[in-house]
Structures are given as structure tokens and as C-alpha cells.
């Protein structure tokens, strides 16, 4: 599905993410290295999208900007209809709290916390009562079949179990948007497939899911692939059969 | 609750990274324990005499004035002052305390030579409300023959028996009946007494027989001999009392001066005496008068110690910040994840502050245990009797908790700022760079800790060297193989028997008698030079016999001692060199002295100088020797000590012999003797104490510096992480990696050393400049601290640096 045909004035009502001519570069000493060049991406609510590209194509930078963790040097980015490119750290943080979930290649669970506590962690920063938190965590444990390892620490888990826990943590508060940065990168193919399946299920339950990956086969499991190369969007196409 | 989550994470962090966490905790605990000990000491010193009820209403009167060239500032006051004081507006109660000499006190069971016998009026225990263990406070001193004794005095004289109603006989013939037993006077009181007898009995005797020695003191306003205290009435103002007191005193004193100096008109301008008042709280720290009952402290030390306590806390907090952020990358992931999922800066600040505060409270617990363990050693070092119980109670617990809380917040402030400011997307990818200023800050910290350690070590070595120098300086007496035996002014026959028995033992070189021995504070009497009646001089007076000079090993520089069988010996005196110089003995061959005023009938008042001895350092060589005149002891001015010098190598045998002779001749009396060498070493107890304290702080500084260096070493390795990794891939040997990784560490350590050497030399010379005589410090003094610091730096570099490098090389 292509979304470029929508009228300009109503995009905010339909797009989860909408970028216009994003530019981002890194400066080291006197040399400016461009990383993203005029990137225009629109992702609608409820989509399951892969942003694919080899190393160095600008995926991670785009992940940071779309995840409201970094600012572009130029251009605009709208998140749920709100222009966020010039927002400061504090406001971006408030905006992403409860609205964006993150899954990483390295899982990034907090080593000192158990599975239950890791899943509960994002809820601590939202205004949610203890009882509701407990209910939400239980629901999530059940949804991802993690009850049997609820008291385990990350170091006691397999890579797959860790990534499922990370996914549970990212979705426990039902965020409208889930960003996954190479979620299968540290897993074997079986594990990777299982994670992609789960991401698909998350998407089916209404969350917009964006997977950043350099694996073509992973990308093909989504509904739409946006191909990045050297900082440019080279193709943007809907998947057949998805 | 978020708070619980923080604490949970904190404890799990400690368990997961137990090595570094325990080190951090240990650093915090040691720092807190040391500053607690110092604060307890400060508290102890600044709370003297606060245990009396209404202690802030109690004042002591002191005397000040001038006689000739001599300025007087004395804690003792004339006897009639108390009565005059009682009549003033604003005074609810006045009382006085008259020191008795060291005297032999006999109960029905035992005799004991007691140093702290005082006389007081009936109000004494109303002003100073020591708890009564036996007897009633009300009217306890009403009878003229009543005496109140302390618990330890009762144990000495009565053992386990009930002392109430028991009789005590003093060697001056007075008899007292025990009417009360009080607790011992607390160690942090300026008062030091074991017996308080009713003064009326002494006064009554003097009134009946005015020829008794010192009888003149009863109504004499120039005779300073008693401590006077008063309690303000509820509406009284101390300034008003002082005003009235001054008016009253000037009249009485002037009349007395006129009478004593046989002047019909006004007293000469260079003689005056007046009175001041001081709250009893202030006596220990701020009193600048002489003749104190006990020793007083210098408030500057208290300020320095308070500053040191807080300085230790500050260094401890900085070390904590250093250690908790040295291996920051360990927590980058956790912080980044929290930030990804919506933790704002505020939450993270709370989290890290909570951690630091919890750390501080655990450290407080460990520190309190350490304080209990270290207290006995600390008491010994400071030469005091303090316990932590006086301090750790309401409301001081609140203060400890507040200080711990603040320490936690201070310690946590930097980690909180540091971590909460992380960019999560950089931290999570390992792209966070350790900033150079982190190295600089830690470097400056390490350099300053090195400077502090070296200065303290140099100072403490210098203090011990100066102590040795002082002890080895000539003191004008031979302390080796000599003892001072306390006798008291009693029964000469017994004394003579002991003397004879010792002389035939063949172990004794010489025996002499003296009223004062080195270490005593001799009384001072005013004399007139016989040629110049307008000049009044104050000289310390010591009543001795002819044998004294040989027994103490005094060296005559002119003339000789009187012969014991000389019929005219009562009019002969020996001067010390200072007195000879003071009186112009050498220039004018001034050879005669006249006693001024206060003499009783038949007393000799005109003396010829028979000889001059070298100065004897009665209070050590720190102070110039006082001009002193040695007079032959008489029946009214009896020597109270026997000085016995033994033949070389016969000291121990000789002391045994003294014990044997004593128990044969006076079996019912406890013997009291002191080696002169012990007395001499007592002169420098303060120097020894401060040297010990400096040594203690040196050790602490070295420990704190080690913590600082551990943090620095771990941090610089992290700073060079990438380069170390690359070099290790290129197969660089471990020691090359170590040398490379720790370049910055060594730079700051060596910089600190270079800075410390001139600074410590300056400080040592500054400290030594306060002494009349001082040693010359050699270079070796500076070598020791440098070696110690180098050694600890190498160990830290090898252990911490090495460990971190191995980790980085394999990461």
C-alpha cells in the first residue's frame, strides 16, 4: 500500500509518522558526514513496516529520530500529528512516554531486575496505580507465555526468552507505536521467526510496528518495505500477500 | 512504588558488582567513622560543665590585676569575695571552694594520700548538683564537721562498707564525718574533687588562733586562694552582677592594698586587682586564667577538629562520587533503558540520590560499629574518657541522621547529574564517550589527596621528631634513676626513718626533700630587692633541704647550697639562673631579698643568696623556666616530696627497696611515687597527643587517597578503553598496556607529590616556629611519605588498573 496519494491537509489524522525532507549528519572535526538525506516517510496507523538497508544506510539514525530520541538537522517529523523536530529532550520524553515501545537487537533488559520487574519498568514512569500495574504485567506475562520465568533474571534466560521479555516490556502499556531495531539480529532463525510472528501479532492487535532490519527475509514478513541506502529512501513498496 | 524499585535495583547492583560496591561502602564507612569520632571529641570538649542543672546560670569569678611588672589573671579569688557576692542583686546563691593541700586522709580502715581535698561552704552542692548515691543533698554540709566524698574516694577509704557516719581524720588534725556520697565528678567538668569538707571547721580554727599559718586569708582581699561561683537568680543579669561586683571590689581591694603596703594614701598605680566573671561552660575552652583546677583546652583545636570532621566527610563524599561513576558504563544500559521507556531526568535524579542515601545509612551502621571498636584506642590517643553514649542520644541522633542524609545527597548529587544527563540512544549503543574532564576532575582529586597525605605524614613525623628533640633537651635535672616519693606534711620521724633505711641500703646516691618537684605548679610570692624597695618581684618559691640539689642533679653555676647544720640557714636561699638574671644578681651582685607583706610573727623575711643553680625546666623546655627561689624548708613550710636518686643500674632494685622500707615503716599507708623520667615525659603529653592524632589522620588520608586512586585508575582505563582494546588485539604485552592505560594516573600522582613537598616543608616549619626550641628537619622526613605514596600508588595501579585493563582487553 502506498500512502503518497493522500492530501496534505489531513495527513495528521492518518499518519503515525510523517517526515518531510529529513536531513541528519554527523560532524567529526572538520568533516561533515551526511547520514540521512531528504528522507520522506509516511507510516499510517496500524501498519507493519520494515525499514531495510545494509549497515551504514542510516537505519539506526532514523530509529533514533523516529523514536523521538534525537533531532534531525533539517526537515520536519510529525508524530501522531505533532511536529516534533524542534522539541527539546524533556518534551520528546513526555511525548514518547506510554506512546512508543522499543525492542533492541541486544535485548537491553536491566540485569538487576527480574522478568516481571523488567516488564513493569515502563509503567513506573506513568501515572498508574500499583494494582493496575500488576494487572497489566500479569496480562502481558500471560500473552507472551512468560509466567514460568517470571522470577528469573536476564542472565538466566536464553536469547529468545530475553527478546520476548523485551517485547513484553515494550508492549505492556499498549503503545500506539512499536519500534524494533534489528530484533532478530542476536537470535537464530527459529528464534528470529518466532519474534517476527509475535511482532505480527502485536500489529494485529492494533499497534503500528516498524522493524528496522538488514535482513531481506525478515523485511519480507512485513506488509511494506522501505529501503534505505546511503541515507536515501530508495524504494517504498507494499508486500504482496501481506 | 518507584522508591522500592530503586532500592531493589540498588541492592541487586551491590550484589552483582560486589567488589566495587563493597569498596565504595567501605570508603564511606571509614570516612563516616573517623568524622564521627572527631565530632564526638568536639562534642565532648565543647560540652564541659553542661550537666549541672541550670548550668547556663552558673558563673565563676576570676581575678585580674597587676603587681609591679607581673600581670595577674587567676582563677582563684579572695575568701571574703563569696560573702560580698551573696549580697549582690541578681545573685541567688554564691559558693566557694578552697583547695586543700595534698594530704593524708585516714579512715578507721586505711590511710590514703589524697590530692583532691577541697573545703566549701554549705551551699556548694546546691549550686553543683552532683547526684547523691548516699545521704541527702539538703543540708548535707550544714554541720561544720561534715564532708561529702565521691564514690571512688569512698572505695579507696572504706572499700565496700557504707561510708555514711564514718569518721575521716586529716593530717592537720581536723576530723570530719561523712554525710554524703556523690557520683564521681564527670570527666568533662572543670571541677576535680574527691572530698568536699565544710570550710567552717578550718575557719573556726583560724579565728580562734590567728597565729596559725594562712590565718590572714580570712579577711584579706589580696590573698587569692579560693574558687568562687555564683548562680544567677531567675531575673538576674550577669552584667549587672559584674558591675556591682567591680564597684564593691575596688573599694575593698584598695583599702587592703593600702593596709598591706603600709601606705596611708592611695595605692601605687602599678598595683591593682579586680574581678571578672565567666560562665562555667566557657571555662574549659575559653578561660585564659591561671591556677585552673584541671587542664583547659584551646578552642582553636576544637575549630580545627570540627573543620577536619567536615573535611573528611567532604573527601568521603567526593570519593563516593568518584567510585560510583568510575565504572559508569556498567550502568549505562540500565539508565538508557529507563530513559527510553519514559524515565525523566527527575526520576533518575531521585533514583541515584536514593541509592546514595541508602549507601550512607548502611555506611552509618558500619561506622557506628567501627566507632564502638575504635573508641578505646581513640580515648587513649586523645587522653580523655569519652564514650559514644553521650553523643548518640537525643537530640544528637537527629543530627547524625541529618548529616548522614546530607552526606548521601551530596555523594549522590554528581552521579545523579551524570547519569540523568545521558543521551539514551548513545548510551545504549556503547557510543558514549568518556569525557576528558572526567579524567581531569579525578586527577585533581587524586593530586589534592596526595598533597594532603604527604603534608599530614610529614607533619606527624615532624611532630614525633620534635617530641624526641624536646625530651632529649637538657632539663636542668637528672631524670634517669630518680623518683619522687609523695609524703605529705606529716610526721617527720617516719620520714627520717625511711631516709636512713634507704641510705644504708647502699643503692641510693642522694636523697633530698622538696615542696615541689618538676611538673608541679609552684606557688608564687612577692619579694622586694633589698636595695630597691620600690621594685616588687614575683618569684616561684620552693622549700627544699640541702640534699635536694644533689638528688635532682642540679648544677651550681655560682656559690653553693647552705649546710644543713648552718645556724643561719633559715636566711639563706638559692636562686635559679632566671631569677638571678631577673634580679640583676650578676650585674649588681645583688645578693639579698626581702619578703613583702603577709608575714606572720617570727617569720624570716630577709634572705641572702647563697648560690645559683642552672634553670630546672619545671614544665618542660617548651616554656622559659620561671624565676625560682629555693628556701630552706621549715616547720611551717614543709617539703612534701622526697627525691631519691639511685646508683646507676640500681633503679629497679632501688624502687623495690623503697617499697619494702615503706611497707615496713608505714604499713597502713598506700605508697605514691613517680619516676622523674615519667614526670618529664608528662611535660610533652600534649605534643605526643597531637602527634598521635596527626598520625591517625595520616593513616586515614592514605586510606582515602587509595580509594581516590582506585576510582581514578578504573576511570582512566575506561577512558582509553578503545585504544587498549586495539593494542591488545595487536598483542601488546600486559605491562605495556598497563603503562599506556595509566599514564594520566601517574601524571596526577606525581604532580601531587611535587606540589606536596614544598607545601609540607612550609607547614612543618610553620608548626615548629611555635616552639622556643626546635629540631632542624632533614630530607629523610620527606622521603618516607613519598615512599609510602609511591608504594600504595603502584599497588593500586597494578591491582585495579591491571584488572580493568585485562577486562577491557578482552571485551
Image (cartoon, coloured by chain):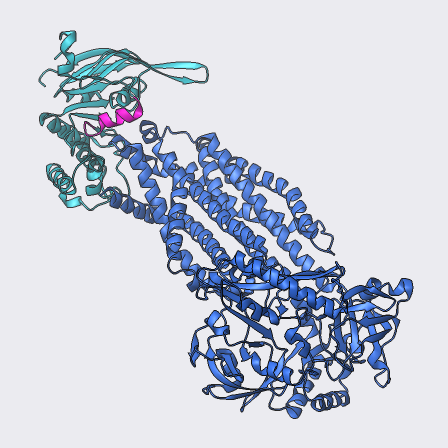
Chain colours: A cyan, B blue
Q: Determine the residue positioned at 74% across, 84% down.
A: B635
Q: Nearer the viewer, residue B149 or B795?
A: B149
The answer to whether residue B72 of the structure is visible from this angle is no
- Depth check: give the residue in front, B275 or A198: B275
Is residue B139 positioned above or below B690 on the image? below
What residue sits 41% from the left and 42% below the top?
A: B410
Is B497 placed left or right of B308 in the picture?
right
Residue appearing at x 59%, y 50% in the figure: B456
Residue B672: x and y in percent read 63, 81
| Residue A152 spot, x, y in % from top left | 21, 45
B640 is higher (above) or lower (below) than A153? below
Decide whether residue B461 is among the magenta residues.
no
Which quadrant would residue A233 be assigned to in this image? top left
Q: Residue furthest right?
A: B588
- Tell me the quarter of the picture where residue B686 sits: bottom right
Please give left or right for residue B562 compared with residue B168 in the image: right
Q: Nearer the viewer, residue A69 or B80?
A: B80
Quadrant of residue B289 within the rendered picture: bottom right
Main structural element of the magenta stretch: helix, strand or loop?
helix
Image quarter (top left, top right, bottom left or bottom right) of the N terminus of chain B: top left
- Give the residues drawn in magenta, as a range: A88-100
Q: Is residue A99 magenta?
A: yes
Residue B328 visible (yes or no) = yes
The C terminus of chain B lies in quadrant: top left
Amino acid at each position: 500500500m502506498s500512502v503518497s496519494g493522500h492530501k496534505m491537509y489531513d495527513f495528521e489524522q492518518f499518519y503515525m509518522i510523517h517526515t518531510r525532507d529529513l536531513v541528519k549528519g554527523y560532524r567529526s572535526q572538520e568533516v561533515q558526514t551526511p547520514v540521512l538525506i531528504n528522507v520522506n516517510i509516511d507510516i499510517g496507523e496500524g501498519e507493519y513496516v520494515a525499514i531495510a538497508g545494509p549497515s551504514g544506510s542510516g537505519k539506526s539514525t532514523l530509529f533514533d529520530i523516529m523514536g523521538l530520541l534525537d533531532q534531525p538537522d533539517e526537515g520536519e517529523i510529525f508524530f501522531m500529528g505533532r511536529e516534533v523536530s524542534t522539541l527539546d529532550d524533556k518534551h520528546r520524553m513526555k511525548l514518547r512516554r506510554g506512546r512508543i515501545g522499543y525492542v533492541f537487537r541486544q535485548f537491553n533488559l536491566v540485569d538487576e531486575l527480574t522478568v516481571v520487574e523488567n516488564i513493569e519498568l515502563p509503567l513506573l514512569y506513568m501515572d498508574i496505580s500499583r494494582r493496575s500495574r500488576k494487572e497489566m504485567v500479569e496480562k502481558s506475562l500471560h500473552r507472551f507465555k512468560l509466567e514460568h520465568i517470571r522470577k528469573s533474571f536476564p542472565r538466566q534466560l536464553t536469547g529468545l526468552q530475553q527478546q520476548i521479555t523485551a517485547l513484553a516490556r515494550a508492549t505492556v502499556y499498549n503503545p500506539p507505536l512499536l519500534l524494533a531495531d534489528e530484533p532478530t539480529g542476536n537470535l537464530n532463525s527459529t528464534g528470529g521467526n518466532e519474534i517476527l510472528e509475535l511482532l505480527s501479532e502485536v500489529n494485529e492487535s492494533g499497534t503500528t510496528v516498524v522493524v528496522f532490519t538488514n535482513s531481506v527475509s525478515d523485511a519480507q514478513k512485513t506488509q511494506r518495505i522501505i529501503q534505505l541506502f546511503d541515507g536515501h529512501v530508495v524504494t517504498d513498496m507494499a508486500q504482496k500477500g501481506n | 512504588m518507584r522508591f522500592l524499585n530503586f532500592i531493589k535495583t540498588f541492592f541487586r547492583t551491590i550484589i552483582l558488582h560486589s567488589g566495587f560496591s563493597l569498596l565504595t561502602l567501605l570508603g564511606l564507612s571509614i570516612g563516616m567513622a573517623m568524622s564521627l569520632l572527631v565530632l564526638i571529641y568536639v562534642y565532648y570538649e565543647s560540652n564541659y560543665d553542661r550537666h549541672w542543672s541550670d548550668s547556663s546560670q552558673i558563673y565563676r569569678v576570676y581575678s585580674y590585676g597587676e603587681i609591679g611588672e607581673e600581670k595577674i589573671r587567676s582563677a582563684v579569688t579572695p575568701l571574703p569575695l563569696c560573702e560580698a557576692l551573696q549580697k549582690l542583686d541578681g545573685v541567688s546563691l554564691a559558693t566557694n571552694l578552697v583547695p586543700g593541700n595534698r594530704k593524708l586522709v585516714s579512715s578507721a580502715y586505711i590511710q590514703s594520700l589524697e590530692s583532691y581535698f577541697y573545703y566549701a561552704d554549705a551551699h556548694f552542692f546546691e549550686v553543683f548538683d552532683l547526684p547523691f548515691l548516699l545521704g541527702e543533698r539538703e543540708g548535707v554540709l550544714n554541720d561544720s564537721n561534715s564532708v561529702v566524698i565521691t564514690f571512688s574516694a569512698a572505695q579507696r577509704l572504706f572499700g565496700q562498707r557504707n561510708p555514711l557516719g564514718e569518721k575521716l581524720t586529716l593530717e592537720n588534725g581536723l576530723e570530719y564525718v561523712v554525710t554524703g556520697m556523690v557520683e564521681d565528678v564527670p570527666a568533662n567538668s572543670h571541677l576535680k574533687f574527691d572530698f568536699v569538707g565544710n570550710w567552717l571547721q578550718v575557719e573556726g580554727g583560724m579565728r580562734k588562733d590567728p597565729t596559725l599559718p594562712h590565718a590572714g586569708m580570712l579577711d584579706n582581699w589580696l590573698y587569692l586562694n579560693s574558687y568562687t561561683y555564683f548562680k544567677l537568680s531567675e531575673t538576674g543579669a550577669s552584667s549587672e552582677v559584674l558591675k556591682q561586683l567591680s564597684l564593691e571590689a575596688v573599694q575593698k581591694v584598695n583599702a587592703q592594698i593600702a593596709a598591706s603596703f603600709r601606705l596611708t594614701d592611695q595605692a601605687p598605680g602599678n598595683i591593682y586587682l579586680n574581678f571578672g566573671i565567666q560562665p562555667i561552660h566557657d571555662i574549659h575552652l575559653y578561660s585564659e586564667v591561671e591556677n585552673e583546677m584541671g587542664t583547659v583546652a584551646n578552642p582553636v583545636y576544637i575549630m580545627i577538629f570540627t573543620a577536619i570532621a567536615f573535611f573528611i566527610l567532604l573527601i568521603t563524599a567526593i570519593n563516593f562520587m568518584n567510585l560510583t561513576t568510575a565504572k559508569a558504563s556498567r550502568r549505562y544500559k540500565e539508565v538508557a533503558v529507563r530513559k527510553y521507556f519514559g524515565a525523566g531526568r527527575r526520576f533518575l535524579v531521585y533514583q541515584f540520590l536514593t541509592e546514595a542515601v541508602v549507601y550512607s545509612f548502611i555506611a552509618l551502621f558500619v561506622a557506628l560499629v567501627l566507632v564502638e571498636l575504635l573508641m578505646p584506642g581513640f580515648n587513649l590517643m586523645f587522653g580523655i574518657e569519652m564514650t559514644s553514649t553521650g553523643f548518640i542520644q537525643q537530640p544528637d541522633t537527629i543530627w547524625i541522621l541529618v548529616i548522614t542524609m546530607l552526606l548521601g545527597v551530596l555523594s549522590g548529587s554528581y552521579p545523579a547529574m551524570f547519569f540523568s544527563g545521558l543521551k539514551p540512544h548513545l548510551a545504549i549503543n556503547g557510543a558514549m564517550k568518556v569525557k576528558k574532564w572526567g579524567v581531569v576532575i579525578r586527577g585533581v582529586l587524586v593530586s589534592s589527596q596526595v598533597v594532603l597525605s604527604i603534608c599530614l605524614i610529614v607533619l606527624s613525623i615532624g611532630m614525633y621528631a620534635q617530641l624526641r628533640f624536646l625530651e632529649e633537651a637538657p632539663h636542668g635535672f637528672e631524670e634517669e634513676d630518680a623518683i619522687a616519693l609523695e609524703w605529705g606534711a606529716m610526721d617527720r620521724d617516719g620520714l627520717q626513718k625511711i631516709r636512713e633505711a634507704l641510705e644504708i641500703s647502699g643503692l641510693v646516691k642522694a636523697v633530698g626533700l622538696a615542696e615541689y618537684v618538676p611538673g608541679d605548679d609552684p606557688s608564687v610570692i612577692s619579694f622586694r630587692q633589698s636595695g630597691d624597695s620600690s621594685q616588687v618581684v614575683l618569684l616561684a618559691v620552693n622549700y627544699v633541704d640541702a640534699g635536694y640539689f644533689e638528688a635532682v642533679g642540679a648544677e651550681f653555676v655560682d656559690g653553693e647550697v647552705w649546710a644543713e647544720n648552718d645556724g643561719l640557714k633559715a636566711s639563706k636561699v638559692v636562686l635559679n639562673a632566671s631569677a638571678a638574671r631577673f634580679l640583676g644578681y650578676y650585674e649588681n651582685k645583688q645578693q639579698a631579698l626581702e619578703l613583702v607583706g603577709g608575714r606572720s610573727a617570727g617569720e624570716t623575711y630577709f634572705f641572702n643568696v647563697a648560690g645559683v643553680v642552672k634553670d630546672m625546666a619545671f614544665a618542660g623546655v617548651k616554656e622559659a623556666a620561671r624565676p625560682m627561689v629555693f628556701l630552706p624548708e621549715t616547720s611551717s613550710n614543709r617539703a612534701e616530696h622526697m627525691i631519691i636518686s639511685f646508683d646507676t643500674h640500681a633503679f629497679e632494685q632501688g624502687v623495690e627497696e623503697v617499697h619494702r622500707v615503706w611497707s615496713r615503716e608505714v604499713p597502713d599507708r598506700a605508697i605514691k611515687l613517680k619516676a622523674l623520667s615519667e614526670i618529664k615525659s608528662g611535660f610533652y603529653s600534649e605534643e605526643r597527643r597531637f602527634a598521635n592524632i596527626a598520625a591517625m589522620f595520616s593513616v586515614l588520608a592514605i586510606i582515602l587517597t587509595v580509594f581516590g586512586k582506585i576510582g581514578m585508575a578504573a576511570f582512566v582505563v575506561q577512558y582509553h578503553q578503545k585504544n587498549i582494546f586495539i593494542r591488545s588485539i595487536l598483542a601488546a604485552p600486559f605491562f605495556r598496556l598497563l603503562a599506556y592505560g595509566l599514564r594520566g594516573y601517574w601524571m596526577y600522582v606525581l604532580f601531587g607529590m611535587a606540589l606536596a613537598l614544598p607545601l609540607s616543608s612550609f607547614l612543618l616549619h610553620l608548626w615548629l616556629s611555635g616552639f622556643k626550641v626546635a629540631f632542624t628537619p632533614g630530607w629523610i622526613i620527606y622521603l618516607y611519605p613519598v615512599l609510602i605514596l609511591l608504594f600504595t600508588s603502584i599497588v593500586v595501579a597494578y591491582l585495579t588498573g591491571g584488572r580493568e585493563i585485562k577486562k577491557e582487553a578482552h571485551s
